[in-house]
Amino acid sequence: MTSSGTRPRRLSLLTTVSALLAGSLLGTAPLATAGEETGRADGPAGVVVPVQTTGPAAARFNLIVLGDGYTAAEMPDFRADMERHLRVLWSIEPFASYRSYINVWAVETPSPESGVDCDPALDSPRRDTPLDMGFWGRCTPGSVQRALQADTAAARSLAALVPGATGANQQILALANSDTYGGTGGGVATASGSNPVSPLITPHELGHTLGGLQDEYDYYGRGVPGAPYTGAEPASAHHTLLTGEEMAHRRVKWWRWLGERSESGGVIGRYEGGLYSARGVWRPSKHSIMKTLGYAFDQVGREVMVRRIAERVNLVQGHTPDTVPIGDDRDVWVDTLHPGGGELSVVWRINGRPVRHPAGARFLDPRRLKLPPGRHTLTATVSDPTPFVRDPAIRGSAALTRTITWTVDPSLPGAPPSREEAPAVFTTHTDTAAPVGRTAVVYADTTHPGARTPAVRWAVGGRPVANPGNDRDLDLRRLRLGPGTHRLTARIAGTDTSLAWTVDATAPVARHEVSPPLRTVRRPGRPVEYVHDGPFTMRLTARDDRPGGVVTEFRVDGDGWQTYYGWPTDANAPYLFTPGGTVIDGLVYGKLGTHRAVPWDDATPDFGTHTIEYRSVDAAGNVSRPRSFLATLVPPRPFAR
C-alpha cells in the first residue's frame, strides 16, 4: 500500500479497570450514537462498543476501528473481520509488548448498501456508505487499484464519539467490506476487511499512519520496476543514500543496528530499493513489513513505532501531589503504565543523589532518608528500559522517560489523621476474565489511602512467591511455570481484598500437512523429509486447549518468520511453494529457498534441501516451540529422446 493513502510473538496482556475511574468506560454494551453525541440529525449513526479496555480513554492510546459498507445484517461480518485483524496485530512487535497501553473501540455504523466504491474496477458500482470508501483512491483514474481510501472528515466525526479520545491519543483504522486486496496510510489507516492477506495490511498501514514510516517497495505500479531515485538524502528514518561506513562514521540513520540479525530475517545492513525506486536508494532489511506483508517490523521501524505508541500516553499515570512542599510523614508514590515486554524502571533521588531503595519500587517512605531540617528535592524518574530502543534521544524523550519532582521539608506538620480512612482497593490491573500466558507480566495497582501505601502480595496455587522491589508487577517468566493451568492471586497486604487470574501455561500445538511428495525420508534424529520435483503445498493448522484465536507463522531456512494466511486468493487454500514462485497481481509468493518479492527478483530455483519451521501463538500469548520438516527440491529429469 502507499503512505498517501484484505475475509480471511508473544502477546501482551489485556487489562481492565476494576474501579470506576474518571473517564473510564467498561463492558461491551453500546455507549452512544452519533445523533446523541453530535446533535447532527444528518450525521451517520454510530454505536460505540468497547473491544479492549486497559484504562480510562483519556490516559490511553485509543485504537478506533470503523467499518464501511457493512449493512446491519452484515455487522457480524465486521466484528469477525476486526477480530482477525486484531489477532494478528497483537502477535506483531511492538504492538504485542505495548498492548496494555491500548484501548480498542469499535464504532459500528450500518451502511445503507453493501460494499464500497469502485471495487474492484473503476467502472464498478458506487455504493452509499458512511465513510464513502473506495478503491483507486476513491475512484480516481490516476490512482492505483489497491489505494483504498476513506472520507477523512467522516471518519474523524465518528471517532469523536469515543469519550476521552482525542487527536493526540487516538488512531483510526477503517475496514472496508471487501475481499479485494487494498489499503492506505495517511490521515486514516485503511484495509479491506476480508481478503486473505488483509490482517497483514493493517500493521503495515499503521506503520504509515501512526509511525510515519515510508514504503520500502521498489515499485509504485505493480509489475513495473520503479525509476532510479534521484532526490536528496531522504528524511525517512529507514531510507538512505549513505553507505554503511558513512552511517557509522557520521552516527546517523540506523548505524546503531548495523550487523544485527534482523527481526524480519537476515541482518540489518543496506539493501537497494525503496520509496518506489528500484535503484539509487537503500533500506535496512531485505524484507520487513514495510516491503513485504507477513514479515515483522525490522529493528529500525520497530524503534520508530515504540516511540509513536509511547508518545500517546504518559508513563506516569498518577503520583503524590507535587504542587506544594510536603512533609516526611507520608509515602511518596507514583503509579505507572505496565508494558507487557517488561517492567518500567523507577529511580528515586534526593538532592540529585540516588536513593538506596528496592529496585523499581513505586513508593518511598521519606522518613528512612533521615533528612535534616530544611527543604530537599526528591525526584522519581520513570523510564522504559526496552531493548527495542537504542537511540538515546528517543530513550530520553518524554515518550520513554518522565521525572516527577517534590519538595520535601521534614519540619512541616503532618497531615491530620482521618477518622474514616477509606480501605485500599485495586484500581487498574491485568484483565482477570481472560487467561494469561506463562510468560506474561501481570500487574495490579491500588489506591493510596492513609500515610502508607499498601503492599501487594502474590501467590501461585496458594503458595506465596517472592516479588521484591516493584510489587505492582509480577513477571511470570521468573517462575518457570510448568505446562497446565495455574491459579495466580494478588492480595492487598493486611486485607482480604484480592484478585485472581488463570494462568494458561500450555502452548498451542501446530501441525503441518504437505501435498503428496515423490518420497518421504525418515531418519533418526532428523525432521521428516519430503522430496519433490516441482510445486507442492503446505497447510498449517493449530490447536489450543482454550478458546480464542491462534496465529501461525513459518520461516524457510532460518529467514524471517511470516504469518501464515493460506493463499492470497483463498484463505482456505494451502500455501503453494514453487521453484520460482507464483506471480499474483505483480507480486511473487511461495518461492522455495531465497525469498522473491517481485517478478524482477532472481527466480533461479534453489534446488536441494530446505528447512521449513512453523509455530503458533495463542490468545494468552503462549508461543509453541518451533517444529520443522525438510523439503528437498530436485531438478526435473532431462527429457530423453
Image: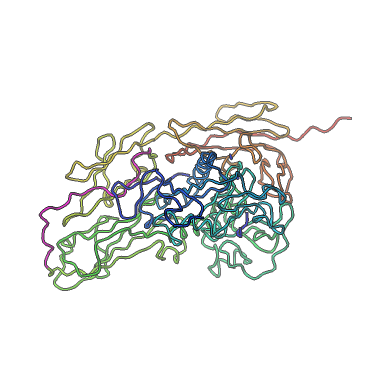
Q: In which quarter of the view is residue 580 placed?
A: top right
Residue 112 drawn above or below residue 570: below
Outermost residue to the right: 641
Quarter of the figure that contains the C terminus: top right
Judge left or right: residue 452 versus residue 552.
left
Quadrant of image for the N terminus: bottom right
Magenta part of the chain: 413-434
Pick the residue in front: 128 or 482. 128
Q: Can residue 294 be spotted in the picture? A: no
Q: How is the image coloured?
A: rainbow
Instruction: Tell me, yes or no, if residue 372 can be seen here.
Output: yes
Confirm whether the magenta stretch covers residue 598: no
**Residue 415 occupies quadrant:** bottom left
Foreground of the two, 419 or 630 = 419
List the single residue furthest toward the front. Answer: 41
Left or right of 134: which side holds 506? left
Viewer-side residue, 99 vs 471: 99
Q: Residue 588 appears at what percent x and percent y?
A: 69, 45
Confirm whether the magenta stretch covers residue 430: yes
Predominant SS along the magenta part: loop
- x, y percent for residue 512: 58, 31
Residue at 19% from the left image edge and 73% from the top image edge: 375
Q: In this image, 545 relative to 424: left or right? A: right
Which percent across, then down, holds residue 615? Answer: 52, 37
Residue 569 position (above or below residue 4): above
